[in-house]
Image (spheres, rainbow, N blue to C red):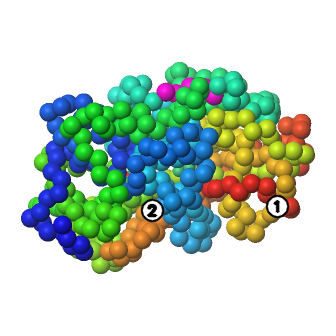
Amino acid sequence: MTTGASDPERVDLEVDYLVIGGGTAGGVVAARLTEDPGVSVGVLEWGPDDRGEDRARYLRRWAEMVESEYDLDYRSVPQTRGNSGIRQTRARLLGGCSTTNTMISWRPLRADLDEWAELGAAGWDADTFQPYFDRLAIPIHPVATADRNPVLADIVQAASTALGLPVQERWNDGRTDVDAHGTGFFELGYDPATNVRGSTSIWYLHPILDARENLTLVTGARVTRLLLEGGRAIGAEYRDAEGVVHVARARREIVVAAGAIDTPRLLLLSGIGPRAVLEAAGVPVAVELPGVGENLQDHAEGLVVWETVEDPPDISASGWDAGAMLQVDAGRPERPDVMMHFPVEAWVEHPKNHGIVFPEHIVAIAPNVAKPSSRGRVWIASPIRMPPPHRLPLFHRPGGPRRADAARRRARRAGDRRGRAVPQPHRARGVPRRRRAVR
Ligand SMILES: Cc1cc2nc3c(=O)[nH]c(=O)nc-3n(C[C@H](O)[C@H](O)[C@H](O)COP(=O)(O)OP(=O)(O)OC[C@H]3O[C@@H](n4cnc5c(N)ncnc54)[C@H](O)[C@@H]3O)c2cc1C
C-alpha cells in the first residue's frame, strides 16, 4: 500500500463487477448481481456502515442526519436569478440517501417513463420498467392510522376543497397511470409496526453482507479516479479514511452509482466529460463526452407558513407524511407538474439564514415544481476541487418562476381553508421553536 499515488501494478481488490457507491441504487445493483454465485461483486462506499446507527434505522429520525457527520451538505453557486447557496443534503453512508430520506414512495409515473423513452432512453418505457418497481424488496405502505397527524388530515381536507383534488388513500395501485391528481397521506417505504425505514441498505444489503461470499463491501472508501485502458474503465483508485490509496479492478464492468452530484464529479475527475469543462479545470481529456454534468433537474421547494396557536401534535411516521399532486398547466392529469408536502414540522433553516424570522407555532405547506423546465449543471473547477460547483435549475429560463409562483398561490389557497390556522399566511415575525433542515 502507498499513500498519495497508486501503484498500477498493485491491486487490492479484484472482482467481476465493481459498484462505486453503496447507496440507493448501488445497494440494489450489488444485491441483484450477487444472486448469481458465479460472479463476484465489490462495493466501494465512501461513508461508514449504517448498521448500529439508530438514526439510520428509524424513519422518524431522518432529519437528525441532515447537516450531520453523514451529510456532504453541498451548496449551489451564486446565481443571478435566485437559488444561490441552496443547501443540497447528500448522504455519505451505506444506503446513501435512502438511509436519510423521507421514503415517500411513488410508482414512477407512466407518462414520465414514456417521455424518457421518447427522448432516447431505450428500455426505460413504462411497460418495460414498471415491473421492476413492482419487484422492489422494500415494504411500501400507506401511512398507518396510528401515524396520521390530525392537523395534516385537516390540511388534506382543506386542499381537497380549495383545489378540487380527490382525497387519495392509495397512490401506487396503477391509478397514477391515468390520473395522478390528488391529496392525501402518502405511501411510505417503512414498516408501520416498527417505523424501520425501507432503505436499500436495510432491505437489500444487511441480509446478505455476511451471507454471500461473492460480495465484498469496503466502507470508508472514497473513489477518486476511474482507471482507464484504451478509453475503457477497468478499475478505480480509492482512498481509505487514513488517506491511503488503493486500487480495485473489475474483470467485467464498473457501475458508477455515486448519486446525482458525485457521479458526474467522479467522471469529470477521471477525464470523462465535456472538453471545455475538463480543460478549464486542468484535467487531461481521456474520453470526450459532452453530456456529463449537464441537465441537472431538481424539485426546488418553497414554503408557505401560517401562524397557529399551538404546534401540531407529535404524531407522524416521517414528519412529511402527506401532500398533494396537481397540475398548473392543465390538460394532462397523468402528468402533474406541482407537488406539495404537508410537513408536521416545517424546516425553516434556509429562510432563517436569509434573515426571515418565524412565529413560535406554525404549520406549513411546501410546494415544489415537480416538472421544472429549467436545467442546472454540475462541473469541476480543478482536479481536486471540493465540493463540486453546481447550479440549481429553477430560475434559469424566462418563465421558470411561473410554475413556482402558481404552486405557491395554490398552497396558500389550500392552507387558508384550514379553520384552525390564523387565516393570513405568516409574513416574518417571531422565532421558530425547532431547528429544521433543508431537504
Ligand atoms: C432529505 C431527502 C429526502 C428525500 N425524500 C425522498 C422521498 O421521500 N422520496 C423519494 O423518492 N426520494 C426522496 N429523496 C431523493 C432520493 O433519496 C434520491 O433521489 C436517491 O436516494 C438517490 O439515489 P442514488 O443511488 O442516485 O444516490 P445516493 O443514494 O445518494 O447514493 C450515492 C452513494 O454513493 C456514495 N459516494 C458518493 N461519492 C462516492 C465516491 N467518490 N466514492 C465512493 N462512494 C461514493 C455516497 O456515500 C452514497 O452512499 C430525498 C432525498 C433527500 C436528500
Give the class, few, some or many, for how many residues have Cα within 10 Å of label 2's Cα (few <14, many ≥20). Answer: some
Q: Earlier in the sequence, mark 2 or mark 1?
A: 2
User: Mark 1 falls on what kind of element?
Assistant: loop
Left or right relative to 366: residue 224: left
User: Mark 2 falls on what kind of element?
Assistant: strand
Q: CA distance from mark 2 to mark 1?
A: 35 Å
Q: Amino acid at mark 1?
A: Val
User: Which residue bears the numbered disc 2?
Assistant: 377
Left or right relative to 70: residue 36: left
Q: Quadrant of the N terminus?
A: bottom left
Q: Amino acid at mark 2?
A: Arg
Q: Residue at x 56, y 52 (%)?
A: 65
Position of residue 377 measured from the top left corner of the image (x, y, whole percent): 45, 62
Q: Residue at x 18, y 31 (%)?
A: 37
Q: Is mark 2 within 8 Å of ligand 1?
A: no
Position of residue 184 measured from the top left corner of the image (x, y, whole percent): 68, 30
Position of residue 67 measured from the top left corner of the image (x, y, whole percent): 57, 59
Is residue 245 part of the magenta span, yes or no? Answer: no
User: Which residue bears the numbered disc 1?
Assistant: 431
Report the disc number at residue 59.
none
- Among the 4 quarters of the image, the one containing residue 6: bottom left
Q: Residue at x 42, y 33 (%)?
A: 203
Give the class, few, some or many, for how many residues have Cα within 10 Å of label 1's Cα (few <14, many ≥20). Answer: few
- Tell me where the magenta segment starts and ends, as one range: 139-143
- Is residue 122 at all visible to an observer of this figure? no
